[in-house]
Image (spheres, grey):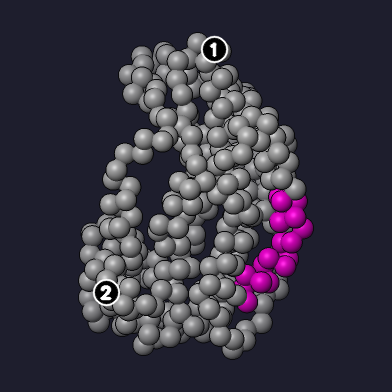
Amino acid sequence: MKLTRTIQNCIGCLAIVALVATACADPDASPASASVSVSQTEVLDLESKLATATTPENAALINNAQHEIAEACMQALGWDLEFGRETAEQIEDLISAVMTPAESWMFDNLAEAAANGYGIESFIANKSSPNTSVAASGASEVEEMSPADQARYQTDLFGSENERIEIVTLDGGEMSVPGGGCFGEAQRAIWGDVPAYYRLRDLSGQAESEAWQLTIDSPAVEAALASWSSCMKKHGHDLADPTASLDLASQVGNEDALAPVDVACKTDSELPAAFGTEFKLAADYVLSDYASGLEEYRGLEAAATARARTYVGDN
């Protein structure tokens, strides 16, 4: 349901996907349902544990170190460019500015909805000002290159097709990622075991998906969601779930009108209570079963953070 948080620089396409890594869970088992009052804070904390083990400080540190290494490598090959840098504050702002999927299911503050909708317009307004603290030169130059130079740029940055790394995922699937060029050099310098990093990233996505699937498949959530959907439809909105409300509001710009209706229907259906209870059960169950992978990722991240600090120091 929820996309993992990615901090990416569009110039060099150097992304830090900071994720909770987890180990395989038993697909035949499932958490028991229970009637428990769960706060929004508890739900969002569990969502965060499923989605990312990396603090904004560490994400900025690792991201900037990779950019530092790749930039120096590309400049040594004759490319006159700079990759952007990010601060922990910028990453924190990006994470906190927009509702997460779980937050959209739990959002039931009518006063806030009436005053600020879902906060989308405020987010857009804040992001409309140019960010002068991030160097981003070189983008237009790349776009204006000849096809031959663009091909050389891509090869120098990401390596050849033969250098790509093939990863076998937990479910037996396969993925291919750049393994050569300056990008590959930067990844190896910071993460060390690059295939392990990508495998653990994939584990996190599977853990998060499993928790969400268990939640929305629970009878309590199914019933509350059906009631919420029926209520929304009476007000002219045929939506599958609360995340669809966010999507619609961002697309057509009607959050001021949509958010209060959404909250009223949540109150009538008691969807936040049902979702919170079942999500906590599912997340606790999944995090327990994936504990060894989570611990492995923490070790990998700690080592990556230590390496990154030798390149750029503390943020």
Q: Which residues are magenta?
A: 281-298
The residue that label 2 is drawn on is: 114
Instruction: Identify which residue is drawn at 68% across, 31% down.
Output: 310
Instruction: Identify which residue is drawn at 48% across, 68% down.
Output: 102
Task: Give the position of the C terminus as an image quadrant.
Answer: top right
Disc 2 versus disc 1: nearer the observer: 2
Quadrant housing residue 179: top right
Residue 121: where, in percent of width, then height? Answer: 28, 58
Q: For the residues marked 2 and 1, what is the alpha-carbon distance in whole angstroms?
A: 55 Å
The answer to whether residue 128 shows anywhere in this view is: yes
**How many C-alpha atoms fall within 10 Å of the one at disc 1: few (<14), some, or many (≥20)?**
few
The residue that label 1 is drawn on is: 77
Residue 45: where, in percent of width, then height? Answer: 57, 67
Instruction: Identify which residue is drawn at 34% across, 23% down.
Output: 140
The answer to whether residue 143 shows anywhere in this view is: no
Q: Amino acid at mark 2?
A: Ala
Instruction: Identify which residue is drawn at 75% across, 48% down.
Output: 299
Residue 217: where, in percent of width, then height? Answer: 54, 75
Relative to 114, 40 lies left or right:
right
**How many C-alpha atoms fall within 10 Å of the one at disc 2: few (<14), some, or many (≥20)?**
some
Q: Amino acid at mark 1?
A: Leu
Relative to 185, 11 lies left or right:
left
Q: Dot 2 lies on which element?
A: helix
Query: Main SS type for the magenta part?
Result: helix
Q: Earlier in the sequence, mark 2 or mark 1?
A: 1
The number of numbered discs placed on residues in the rendered structure image is 2
